[in-house]
Image (cartoon, rainbow, N blue to C red):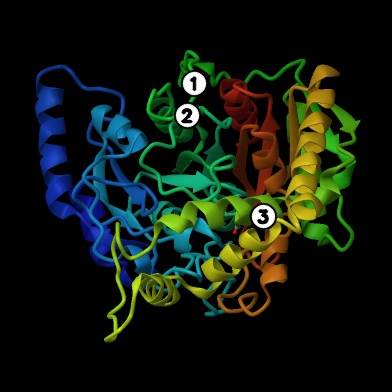
Amino acid sequence: TEACLKAIDGAGPLNAFVHHTPEIATEQARAADARVKAGDAPALCGIPLGIKDLFCTKGVPSQAASRILQGFRPEYESTVTSQLFDAGAVMLGKLNMDEFAMGSSNETSTYGDVVNPWRAGNDETKLTPGGSSGGSAAAVAADLCLGATGTDTGGSIRQPAAFTGITGIKPTYGRCSRWGIVAFASSLDQAGPMAKDVRDAAILLQAMCGHDPKDSTSADLPVPDFESMLTGDIKGKVIGIPREYRMDGMPDEIEALWSEGRKMLQDAGAELRDISLPHTKYALPAYYVIAPAEASSNLARYDGVRYGHRATLSQGDGITEMYEKTRAEGFGDEVKRRVMIGTYVLSAGFYDAYYNRARKVRTLIKRDFETVFAEGIDAILTPATPSSAFALGQEQADPVQMYLNDVFTVTVNLAGLPGIAVPAGLDRKGLPLGLQLIGRPWEEGDLLNTAYALE
Ligand code: GLN
């Protein structure tokens, strides 16, 4: 813990941590020492972690990287973080992210950009760590903490993991409680760990999962011992290679990486099978209807009355002006864009044309996966991202270009499946690239083990 706190102090320019909690960390680390001495050390005893700012942490600023939550200190602890602390983990502080987890580059944060600790050779251009869990990814990659929490609505654990050369898993929807995590798109949001390798991810996920009566979508299922499932034995497993993920204009390096991954799995005894997920091409548009729709309704609660920021009002302003001014000042451009898109697609005249249609597409995407799993596919291998980390500022001006980053990850959220990104090599510029494995629902253990074979 001391070493991490020191490293964080020296890593200001990365802008990964937005709130430091050294007092809490020291207290938790002392308690961990005492538990070790008493011979009662739980799995994460004394392990220093960073916590994404989307998680409510009791008495500690929790702003979802938004100005509208300025000054908000929750009265409660999220289920996931409280489970981590029960397992002995230590909180070093809160991690930067895209505002309300909306973004793929960590550039929408009210705290400013996070800088990827990686550089392309001698080129000093600052790169994005990806988003929205950009602070989590940069902090783990730069050794500021041993692991971090992330959340993934459309790729926000897996894409930043791939951009920074670390491992991140989004479990099956319902595996981790969403209670106490600031809601973005409730039917897609899931928490998960971001870690240095598959084993660490398995240990962290173990502590984060489990049924929680406070989240009605949390699954009441036993949580297997994920770490003990890491045998590296994947003989006889059938890995699907979906042809729709071979996109036009995909860089040959990504194609080469994917083929390398196929070979590694085959060498480890898995059987490869070409599969088709025919509705893949509709996933991105469906996601960018459904996620904003849910966001627009979730974000209605930020009204200047209940949480954080309230605009200074003028003489004669009524409650409408308070809402308008507070929301105009409190939300950044990307959040406003999502609220507008979401409100539009949910409005009476357009509901059927956009929102309902997107929901139907979502069902078809889910069925694509169900069909291949029913045909005996155990896991699906794809690239994690269509490129390596890009320069900060490069894609900010064009939201659609930014959304295209999520092309390989959003299907997994729409179908509620577990997905993991593992580092799989470097590109020509010397930047990390990741591969994604998609698993059957509730089979995170098997998925982690397949990912382990790729390490
Ligand atoms: N980049 C996607 C978005 O902006 C995903 C974000 C996420 O998973 N939280 O919506």
In the foreground, 404 or 385: 404
Q: CA distance from mark 3 to mark 1?
A: 40 Å
Q: Residue visible at 31% across and 30% down?
A: 83
Closer to the eye: label 3 or 1:
3
Badge 3 or badge 1: first in the primary sequence: 1
**Would you name the residue on which mark 2 appears?**
202
**Would you name the residue on which mark 1 appears?**
226
Q: Amino acid at mark 3?
A: Leu
Q: Is residue 50 above or below residue 40?
A: below
Q: CA distance from mark 1 to mark 2?
A: 5 Å
Q: Amino acid at mark 1?
A: Phe
Q: Amino acid at mark 2?
A: Ala
In the foreground, 395 or 364: 364
Q: Residue visible at 34% across and 75% down?
A: 318
Quadrant where the C terminus is found in the figure: top right
Give the farthest residue toward the bottom. 315
Q: Is residue 348 above or below residue 200?
A: below
Q: Residue 137: image x %, image y %?
A: 47, 54
Closer to the eye: label 3 or 2:
3
The reply to whether discs 1 and 2 touch (Cβ–Cβ < 8 Å) is yes
Other-residue count near label 2 (Cα within 10 Å), few / some / many at <14 / 14–19 / ≥20: many
Query: In the image, which disc is placed on residue 346?
Result: 3
Badge 1 or badge 2: first in the primary sequence: 2
Q: Residue visible at 49% across and 51% down?
A: 298
Q: Is residue 262 above or below residue 346?
A: above
Which secondary structure, mark 3? helix
Q: Residue 359: image x %, image y %?
A: 74, 42
